[in-house]
Structure formats: structure tokens, C-alpha cells
Amino acid sequence: MQSLLNSLNYIAFLGTTITLDTGIGAEIFESVVTVLQFITIGIGAIISIVGLIGFFEGRGDEDSQKQSKGRNQIVVGVGIVVVALVTIPLLGNIL
């Protein structure tokens, strides 16, 4: 992998050239990965909170459909957060 990185002097990223030799490009890429991780965790947390609210509304109204939908949203939100915590940092290690 390191020899592949040594043979490539630049990466085309959104129409701009990022040079890895100076370290500036690597810092920019790491900050993009960090922002992407932060945004993804936020989206997952919001989905989980909405699901939690829906779940408890369903429990109060004894509506099994609301409970099921809320439970599914909680699981999806937690899944998104786990993907953000595990997979997105691996993107930074690829380059």
C-alpha cells in the first residue's frame, strides 16, 4: 500500500489536486473525514431520538404500530452511528 501511495503524487478530490507529499493534503483529507463522521453521527442520533419519541408515544397510546416504527428507527439510528464510528475512520486510513 505504501508503494502505491509513493507512486501517486496527487489525488483528484472534487476537482482540486491534493498533494500527499507535503502533508497539507493529508490534513485536509483527515479533516473531511472527521466532518463526515461528525455529520453521520449527528444524523444517526437524530433518527434514534425521533424513534425513541415515537416508541414512547406508542406506549402511551398503546399503539403497536407506533411502537414498532419507533423501535425500527432506534435500531436504524444506532446502526448509522456504529457505521460512522467504525467504517468512516477506515476511509482515512485508506490514503
Image (tube, grey):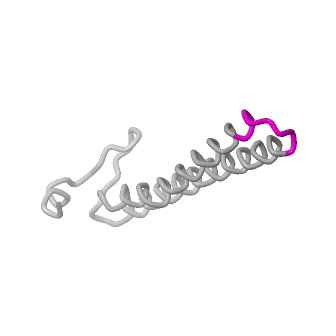
x, y (%) of residue 82?
Answer: 50, 57
Say if the magenta span includes residue 53.
no
Look at the image and give the residue range highlighted in magenta.
60-67
Q: Nearer the viewer, residue 2 or 81?
A: 81
x, y (%) of residue 62?
Answer: 83, 39
- Position of 67 relative to 42 (above/below): above
Q: Which of 82 and 65 is in front in this view?
A: 65
Residue 77 left/right relative to 60: left
Residue drawn at x 86%, y 45% is: 60
Residue drawn at x 43%, y 60% is: 86
| Residue ranking furthest to the bottom | 23
Residue 84 left/right relative to 49: left
| Residue ranking furthest to the right | 61
Residue 43 left/right relative to 2: right
Q: Nearer the viewer, residue 39 or 15?
A: 39
Residue drawn at x 68%, y 37% is: 69
User: Quarter of the image containing the N terminus?
Assistant: bottom left
Residue 40 left/right relative to 74: left
| Residue ranking furthest to the top | 65
Dominant secondary structure of the magenta stretch? helix
x, y (%) of residue 30?
Answer: 43, 61
Q: How many marks?
A: 0
Figure quadrant of residue 90: bottom left
x, y (%) of residue 27?
Answer: 42, 64
Q: Nearer the viewer, residue 50 or 11?
A: 50
Say if the magenta span includes residue 62.
yes
Residue drawn at x 29%, y 57% is: 94
User: Quarter of the image containing the C terminus?
Assistant: bottom left
